[in-house]
Amino acid sequence: MKLKISTYSHISPSHIQVDGKDVLATIPRSSFDEDTLAIYKSLGIDYPKFYKMDAPSKLGFLASELVLKSLDLKQYYKSEDIGVVLYGASGSLDTDQKFQATIGQPTDFFPSPAIFVYTLPNIVLGEICIRNKFKGENYSFAMEAPDSVEICSFIQNIFEQEQVMACLCTWTEFQNRDQYRSIMLVIEKEECLQKRDMNEKFSNFEEETLKQIFYKDL
Amino acid sequence: MQELINKLKKEIIEQLNLQDLSPSDIDENAPLFVEGLGLDSIDSLELIVLLQRNYGLKIAKAEEGREVFHSIKSMAEFIHKNQNK
Amino acid sequence: MAYLIADHIISPLGFGTAENFDTLCQGHSGLAEHIHPTIGPYIAAKIDREKLQLAFSDELSLLGNFTFAEQLCILSVKQVAQKADLDLKSSDTLLVFSTTKGNIDLLHTKQFDQSRVRLGKMAEMVSTYLGNPNKPIVVSNACISGVQALLFSMQVLHSKRYKRVVVCGVDILSDFVLAGFSSFQALSLTPCKPFDKNRTGLNIGEACVSMVISLEESGNVRLSAGASANDANHLSGPSRTGEGLSLAIKRSLANAGISPQQIDYISAHGTATPYNDEMEALAFQTEKLSEVPLNSFKGYFGHTLGAAGVLESCITAQCIKQNKFIHSLGFEHLGVSVPLHVIQKTTDGPIHTALKTASGFGGGNAALIITKA
């Protein structure tokens, strides 16, 4: 079965890109909080939940909005056939540290439920599903560095076994406010893209392409 | 009382990350949950923490907080009534 | 589809699957009262550190450079490898970990290098020590991690990249998780009562469980098929309709090619929070499973988070092997809005096919069909 990357985005301290091309170039890069707010505003969406998200969720959420803005997957697939597969190394560690700070001292012990709910690596995946009403397969993995062979093989598998018809696959890694990147790929079957009469040249979803995307600019 | 209400508004915006709002956007009489600010269950738990940390007031169960957390005004009244006990 | 070759459980109920299962059958719970300096008394299922030290003193004496969670993984994986006659050093063997918070206690204790709080790093520490040449994979998807790690491992075997997979589920008791659930007002002050009308919340537990699975025909239980689905509704609140869980079950049945009538037993998630249990009951009703005998093991082990799905699947496999329906500890009077057949007494009876389910934060749901081989 031939899989294609129908579109992908990349957000890092130095990049805001869709399909390898810079977008939102007018946003002056300053800090994570200002940058993400500027990206959110530029997308022209009204989604107050964004403000409540922790940093890793904001990062992954915006990367997903960048690709889904011009591609309404639900127009082509049932919501339960759209999967999301997440990979990352640090997961929710930044938020874990914030939560730990709320319970660090017996005299200042006020654990925050709003922070605690984000102390799981898979929460960003939940945010993306809630926003888009994606109800399909959901996988959340931790690995120290993106492993193109593993990722390719697994995604290929879940398509072949008809667990998903389309899927978002992301490497979302938030170490701290200076070191972060989210790469969000939309993966579809070649035959589905052909049916939509899409004549654009899409990249094949294969190890080499993944390596190029994941390790470019590193 | 108005001073307390204004302080609460600021604290709630800060605590619940309602960055798109300013204190003047919030009607102290409007329901906090569902309509009004559209807060949810995690927010109500967070408000319990806020009352405990900033005012030393304890609410044991989220359900007990329903009346208290009806609006900013009801929260202010609850604080006013209980803080000087 | 994959065969279960061997398994091993380290839990408050004992060391080894047999000891755990015997203790369960006798109706003993690992839940007990503990005291936290700020939270006060709480109920949890905690592994007896002294007993563990005694049982594995030789091995543990070599593991001073490892965290408690890593030590548990090493012990458990070594035990299961021995039982399965498995070569951990072979490139045909993959280690898959399932955990939500791994070494989270290091944030507080500041012992060891902080990089080990990263789940992938923790997994690498364990796999390197065990001499496994492959990069380990960590499934971390809140409370569905364990079931999903098994589903993932079945996929991996299917792709023929590895011959055998060791799935190791681990989560330990920590102030972090305790404080978190406490802030959610989700902790029960008494031993939890899944599906009961007087249930008030969950208890936390800790465990480390390993299972070896393979496509080679062997053993007498197999994992048939499964699926996951997202509620796409709320981060922490279960769906009010059970739609996501229902979808995961429907797909699992379809993937396994069986009908709801063929399910003899359900090992539910059953955390004993009011909303979770209600949501599950609704999903079981939607999938025409209301009359199937069902239990939750949380009354014995507490909620072991990332380990729960592996632990409960492992126990479910034992129930199938030994044809036992185990009492859903803590249950007295039905406390959900639709009928449900909660097991009230441990009895013998034929189990051919079982359904294991899990649901968690982030809106995830997962289901797995386990059958006699």
Image (cartoon, coloured by chain):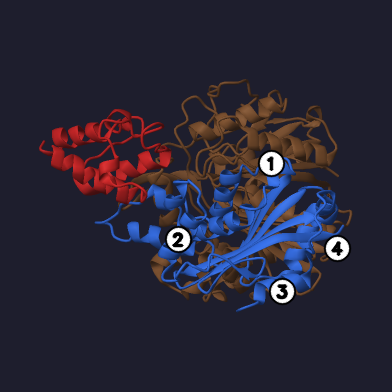
Chain colours: A blue, B red, C brown
Which residue is under mark 4? C160
Give, as a three-letter code, the residue at label 2: Ala
Give the image location of residue C369, x and y in percent: 76, 41
Which residue is under mark 3? A211
Q: Nearer the viewer, mark 2 or mark 1?
A: 2
Give the image location of residue C245, x and y in percent: 65, 37
Discs 3, 2: same chain: yes
The C terminus of chain A lies in quadrant = bottom right
Discs 4, 1: same chain: no
Q: Residue furthest left?
A: B84
Residue shown at 84% from the left, 60% from the top = C159
Residue shown at 20% from the left, 36% from the top = B76
Image vertical order of residue A14 relative to residue C230, above or below: below
Determine crowd level at label 3: few under 14, some 14-19, many 20+ residues with C-alpha closer than 10 A. some
Give, as a three-letter code, the residue at label 1: Ser
Chain to which the residue tagged by mark 4 belongs: C
Chain to which the residue tagged by mark 3 belongs: A
Q: Secondary structure at mark 2?
A: helix
Q: Secondary structure at mark 4?
A: loop
Sequence-wise, which precedes: disc 3 or disc 2? 2
Of residues C257 and C170, the one nearer the viewer is C257
Q: Secondary structure at mark 3?
A: helix
Give the image quarter of residue C98. Answer: bottom right
- On residue A38, the disc is 2
Left or right: residue A130 compared with residue A205:
left
Give, as a three-letter code, the residue at label 3: Lys
Discs 1, 3: same chain: yes
Question: Distance of mark 4 from mark 3, alpha carbons?
Answer: 22 Å
Sequence-wise, which precedes: disc 1 or disc 3? 1
- On residue A79, the disc is 1
